Image: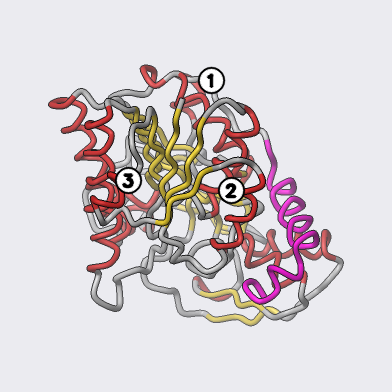
Amino acid sequence: MKIIVTGGAGFVGSTLCLQLKSKYPSYEIVAFDNLKRRGSELNLIDFQKNGIGFIHGDIRNNEDLQSLGNFDVLIEASAEPSVTAGLDSDPTYVINNNLYGSINCFNACVKNNAKLIFLSTSRVYPIETIENALFIEEQTKFLFTDNQNITGISSKGISEELSLEGARSFYGTTKLSSELFIHEYAAFYGLKAAVTRFGVIAGPRQMGKTDQGVVTLWMAKHYWNQSLKYIGYGGKGKQVRDLLHVDDLVELIDYQIHNIEKFTGKVYNVGGGLKNSASLQEMTDICQKISGNKIQIDEVSETRTADLRIYITDNSKIENEIGWKPKKSVEDIFKDIYLWIQKNEKQLESILK
């Protein structure tokens, strides 16, 4: 089997390439990436060591995709992942990359009669709807309540039943648009595809930033004794996300590759779930415990554009229909990131510090 991973030198992409090659040595795994993300070039050394092919290309360019030759599976993990992309400037880049680039990938799959594994996002759901949901404020975090007047939100989190009406960011809209195109390609070209709306994905190999990669950022700042900020919702760090270890994501995608018929025509929400959720305050406590460092954290009351007080994934549908559940805890995620930074400190210092 030949598997192409677009965005293959990124956090999720590189982890997929290395773990799939390790599990299936006879498979040909090819990472396809434009190396735009700082730090992605570091993964090329690991690719070479592990027999993973690399093509320097851009999904926005059809000629680059044609250089891939024949393949059996394409994992589309190449998105511009920042929720804030295009919100305060021209959104052309995020639209070209996440929508038009993805369509080029779909066409390549049709041409090769190949399976598509599409990594979508929880950000397809409208911001205002989620922000208007009923919640409680506890000592360290916000949580959804069960007595909602909105279908698709409960104390378990957000399910696939939540309405898609409303604004969600250019990032979220490009991913939702790509999902809609996949339905068309499936209906009229027979494209076999698995579409998954992932929440926050975290773990080693992620180059942390505030707008995405916040889990790595949090640990890196503790590791190097640098300050952080609680931004928004009063500046107390009570906003919550559920966290999915990248290893749990790889396990699911491995299953999707080999059981695509169970996913065709369906969409699943996938994340750490309520059990693996944490507020910024709680993330701080975990990082202090693991690193042994207590750092300065400033408070900024003003909430950033497109931010969410709470996002927790309700995994009920995929758990009931597929039997998949996340195995790794929030603590596992932070420990693995800490050990990764410790092992690669010199390489990562200029990127994460």
- Residue placed at 56% from the left, 56% from the top? 240
Chain-order first, disc 2 or disc 1: 2
The alpha-carbon separation of the residues under discs 2 and 1 comes to 19 Å
Residue 229 in the image, given as x and y percentages of width and height: 61, 77
Please say if the residues under marks 3 and 2 sit with CB atoms less than 8 Å apart.
no
Q: Is residue 126 left or right of residue 331?
A: left
Identify the residue position indicated by label 1 in the image. Answer: 323
Chain-order first, disc 3 or disc 2: 3
Q: Amino acid at mark 2?
A: Leu
Helix, strand or loop for disc 2:
strand
- Residue placed at 16% from the left, 26% from the top? 189
Which one is nearer the viewer's eye here, 223 or 340? 340
Identify the residue position indicated by label 3 in the image. Answer: 67
Identify the residue position indicated by label 2 in the image. Answer: 243
Q: Let me know if residue 282 is in the magenta part.
A: no
Chief SS of the magenta region: helix
Q: Amino acid at mark 3?
A: Ser
Q: Quadrant of residue 186?
A: top left
Q: Quadrant of residue 281?
A: bottom right
Q: Residues within 10 Å of mark 2 (few under 14, many from 20)?
A: many
The alpha-carbon separation of the residues under discs 3 and 2 comes to 36 Å
Helix, strand or loop for disc 1:
loop
Rendered-image quadrant of the C terminus: bottom right
> How many circles with numbers are drawn on the protein?
3
Q: Which residues are magenta?
A: 328-353
